[in-house]
Structures are given as structure tokens and as C-alpha cells.
Image: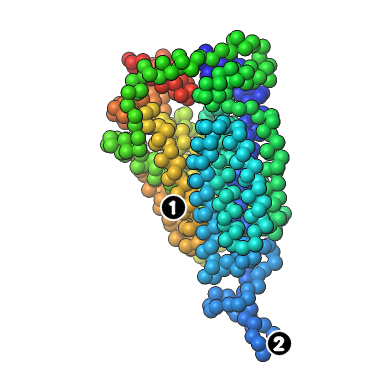
Amino acid sequence: MDFDKILKSIGEFGKQQRQQFVIVATICSMWTAVHMLCLAFVGLVPEFHCVDQKVNTKTDDVISDACAKPCKKYVYDAEFTSIATTWDLVCSESYKIGLAQSIYMSGVLVGSYIFSSLSDSYGRRISFFLSVGLLTVFSLGSAAATSYNMFCILRFLTAMCNGGAGLTGFILATETVGPSYRALAGTLVQAYFAIGIVIYGGIAYLIRDWRYLIAVTSMPGILFTMAYWIIPESPRWLITRGRVHEAEDILHYIANKNGMRVTKDMLQLESSDKSSNSSKSSPMAGKTYGFLDLFRHWELRKRMLILTYTWFTCSMVYYGLTMNASSLGGDRYLNFILSGIVELPAYLVCMMFINRSGRQKTLFWSMMLGGIACLSLIIIPSNTSHIDSIKTSLALLGKMGIAAAFNIIYIYTAELLPTVLRNTGIGVCAMAARIGGILAPAVVPLGESLAFFIFGGTGFTAGMFDYLLPESLNKPLPETIADLSQTSSKVTNKEAMVMDEQRVQDVERKIDKLSNHDDTAFSENDD
């Protein structure tokens, strides 16, 4: 029996899947969000001044402009400590704070690829919990770092494990979810990340010492690693490794936990030989496609360039606005918490409109909202009353738009790229997103006006480019590059509503097969 058909018979999102999803999503999204945005508070710079200690004076000479000339000793406000106060990362050394975050995001990029390979070779579960355990060790080590260089090395290693935990955890949390609930599960993972932002803001408010802050937020990893004994391996991965009987045992376990009375004989999966033969008979089996094929065909090249730029922009603006939330006017902790809260309604609105107005229009307006809100921040007169509240509101509005766009782009990209190049294309887009995350910390120190101009300008232009993309709602997924010409024309909502019901069901059937990595999903001729 087909894997997704079995999921439908035992429960697509039953009690066991929900419990596993909550545990894994808490770790791979909520907890990793805390580490991803650690420097939002660990890298804060408090008020400070320079005290030039002179030999023949009994009192210190306080210099009004702390960065006016070389200084031997800085004195910091006692509100909180950070790596800036510990290693004097101010004035000419202030760039090192943004550099530390860029190094961290580079580690996430490296770790995503390392643990992705480990996950495919050795299993989702062991790779996920290995990354969680190592993340805990390296993060606790960074809390005890005795130098800036040591701190950066340990944060890079922490980031590698963070990237691995996020990637393998997402797969582990969603691979046993039925096709009817996958879009919801993907959105909920994003929501868990937003909740992690809110929680981290609250913890940072209570713990003002950066070493204790890292230590306290790392400690849950010890408890999380114990979940290894209650989370089963992904049955999908077991099937790809030929361990069909183990996969069937896990599916039977899921069925029992969901309260479904089934026997193992009722859950027999298709043999690997049959699946292999089906794949060989697929029209896609005769040719191997690579990276360069993404840019050979004009329509595919256009889509890839726009999608890559959009992924890059979403990541850069998202992390830039989040990291900068604690530096806006007003209460830095409240602003940071609000930057997480505004994502929750963004995801709700996103889910409401992508199946009604379509992917393209929802993405376009989300990007435009984010871009225009950021651009508005640089034209507010400095003498405006309640300027701090206005700036915070606009920044949060921009964050809301970008968060919605970031959620849509995952679904939209998968639907726009042909099956033969879908994984390769998404990998390229994901790399562009990581590069955007690496550059975000370098943009924030450029100054508020220039930073928001870059965030707003890229968001606005990305939205304009996104308008050139075709709608994918209620349209069959392209199988080959040649199919792109059939899906490039735009479809109105009225036309989509009057589509033949049997045609819609046929598309859904093909998507279900595709999600199960069945290359025969599009082997039948479309009418």
C-alpha cells in the first residue's frame, strides 16, 4: 500500500503525530530560535563613556565623546552585561558584534549541509538528537569563553548544530504527517519559532548577565536529548533504506497510539523492488538534471532569479528586523517580544489568503507591506511626537509582512519548479536565504536610516519582481522543464473556481504521490 494512503487510514495527524510534532517542533524551532537570535541581547551595547586614567591626577577625566580619541578604559552602564562590555567591543571594535552574528549564520549554512547528509545516511532521529546534544555542549562552552576569538569559534560550532537541528527536526516532525495537514504543520513550525522569540525576550528581561543568559537558555538541551527514547525513526527514511519491516512496525505503533484498530497485515507497504521498477518506467528516469539546468530555459531562469532574490531578501530583512528590534526606541525587551508576537497573526492571515487570493498575490502584498513599512521609517521627521512608538509600530508592521512572505515562499517555490529540478532549485534558494542571514548583521550597524533603506528597498523590489511570477493555485505541478510553458499564464480566481472538479482531484492525487517521492506521480497523460 502507498505510504500516504496508510497515513490516511491510521490518522494523518492523530494523537501520536501531534505529540511527536509538539516535542520535535519545540526543540527544532522554538529552542533553536533562542540560539539563532542570541546576540540580540548578548551583543547589546549599553551606555558608556571613556575614562582616561592619568598618572598625576586623583580623579578620572571623563571624556564627553567616548569615541573621540583612543581610550584605555571604558565604563559601562550597569543595566546589563554583554560581550561588548566584557571585551570592549565599542567604537572602532564595534564591528565585531555584527561579525560574530555573521559567523554564526555561516555556521548554520555549513551545519545544514553536514547534518543533511548525515540525516540521509544514518537516519533522521540519530542526526537530530546528535545535533541537539552537541548544540548544548558548544553553547554552554560559549558561555564560559575567555576571549572573543574563543567565543566566535564556539558560536560557529553551536550554529552548525543549530542548523542541523532545525533541518533534521523539521523533517522528523513532518514526515509522518498526512498530506492534508502538511501545509498546516509547516506553518506551525514557523509559529513555534515566533514563540521562541517571545520566550527569549522574556528570559533576557529577567537575566541581564550574558553568560548566565546563554547558560540558562542552553540547559533545556540536556532534557531534550532524553526525548531520543520516545521519538521513533522516520518510517519514510526507513523505506528508502530498504528497512520496510521496521517502517511497518512504526506505522503500527502510530496506529495504536491513535486508537486505530489495525493489524500489521493491513499496513503492508509497497516493496522496494516494485517502487524501483515504477521509478525506472517514469519519463524522468532517463536523464539527470543538475544546477546549470536551472538557468538554461528562459522561463525557468526567470523564476529562479526572482525566487532566489526573494529568499535572500526575506531572510536578510527578517533577521535584520528581529536583531534590530531590541535597538529601537522604547523598551528594548518589549519591542523584541512584540516582534515575535506579530508573526502569529501574519501566519494566520497567510493561511487564509494563499488558498483564496492565490500564492502570487499574497506574496506580492506581503513583500510590499514589509518593504513600504521599512522605507517609511526613514522619512519620519525627527521632531515627530511619539516618534518611538511610530517607529516601533512601522518596524513591527514590516516584520509582519516579511514573516508572512517567508512562509509563503516555501510553498510557492515548490509549486513553481519542475519535479526534475525541484530539490536542486529549493537548495539553491535556501543557500541564498542563508547568505541573506549572514549579511543582515552587517547591515544593521550601517545606521538606522541606511539599514531601513536597504531592508525596505530590497523588500519593495522583490515584491515587484514577484508580481511577474505565474499563479500556481489550482494548477498541476510541472513535471518537466517543457511543462513550464503550460503553467506560465496567470489564472484569475473566477477561472480557478470553475475548474473541473475531477481535474482538481487529479492534481491533488499527483501532489500526494509527489510528496511521497513517487516519480510516477505525473506519468499519466493529462487530458
Which amino acid, mark 2?
A: Lys
Label 1 neighbour load within 10 Å: few <14, some 14-19, many 20+: many
Q: Is residue 131 above or below residue 155?
A: above
Residue at image x 35%, y 23%? 284
- Is residue 81 found left or right of 438 in the rendered image? right
Residue depth check, mark 2 versus mark 1: number of the one nearer the observer: 2
- Circle on res. 43: none
- Is residue 135 found left or right of 236 in the rendered image? right
Q: Is any part of residue 173 visible from this angle?
A: yes
Local secondary structure at mark 2: loop
- Circle on res. 456: 1
Label 2 neighbour load within 10 Å: few <14, some 14-19, many 20+: few
Local secondary structure at mark 1: helix
Q: Is residue 4 above or below residue 154?
A: above
Q: Position of residue 408 (x, y in %)?
A: 47, 36
Q: Position of residue 489 (x, y in %)?
A: 31, 30
Looking at marks 2 and 1 on the same chain, the residue that comes earlier in the sequence is marked by 2
Which amino acid, mark 1?
A: Gly
Q: Is residue 75 above or below residue 215?
A: below
Residue at image x 67%, y 90%? 56
Where does label 2 land, which residue?
A: 58
- Is residue 86 found left or right of 451 in the rendered image? right
Total label count?
Answer: 2
